[in-house]
Amino acid sequence: MNQLDNLLTQIAQQHLRIETLETRRSDSLDFHDVAVWCLRDALEAAFNAGVEQGRKAVNADKTSG
């Protein structure tokens, strides 16, 4: 798994109580009922992770250039 996959899996586990994002070819394992507030929390966590990655990239550019 790459860094993004690990991050998304971690968010799914923490906020959605979904064990894995891998396709398991079983409706009971691949489809989940999720409360909207949990989905919102997961989306917010993903957004914040993206913002943090952007900040790191900008800072890296500033120090290398």
Image (spheres, helix red, strand yellow):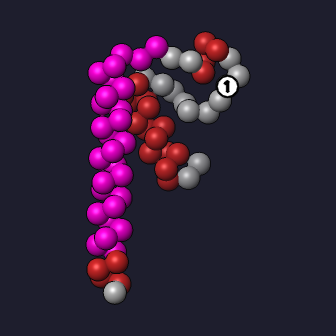
Q: Residue furthest right?
A: 25
Q: In the image, 44: left or right of 28?
A: left
- Identify whether 15 is placed above or below 11: above
- Residue name at image x 56 percent, y 18 percent: 31
| Residue 27 placement (x, y as % from top left) | 64, 14
- Residue name at image x 49 percent, y 50 percent: 4
| Residue 6 placement (x, y as % from top left) | 49, 45
Q: Which residue is mark 1?
A: 24
Give the SS element for disc 1: loop
| Residue 9 placement (x, y as % from top left) | 48, 37
- Identify whether 45 is placed above or below 33: below
| Residue 14 placement (x, y as % from top left) | 37, 30
Q: Amino acid at mark 1?
A: Arg
- Residue name at image x 36 percent, y 26 percent: 39
Let me know if residue 39 is in the magenta part.
yes
Q: Which residues are magenta?
A: 33-60
Let me know if residue 59 is in the magenta part.
yes
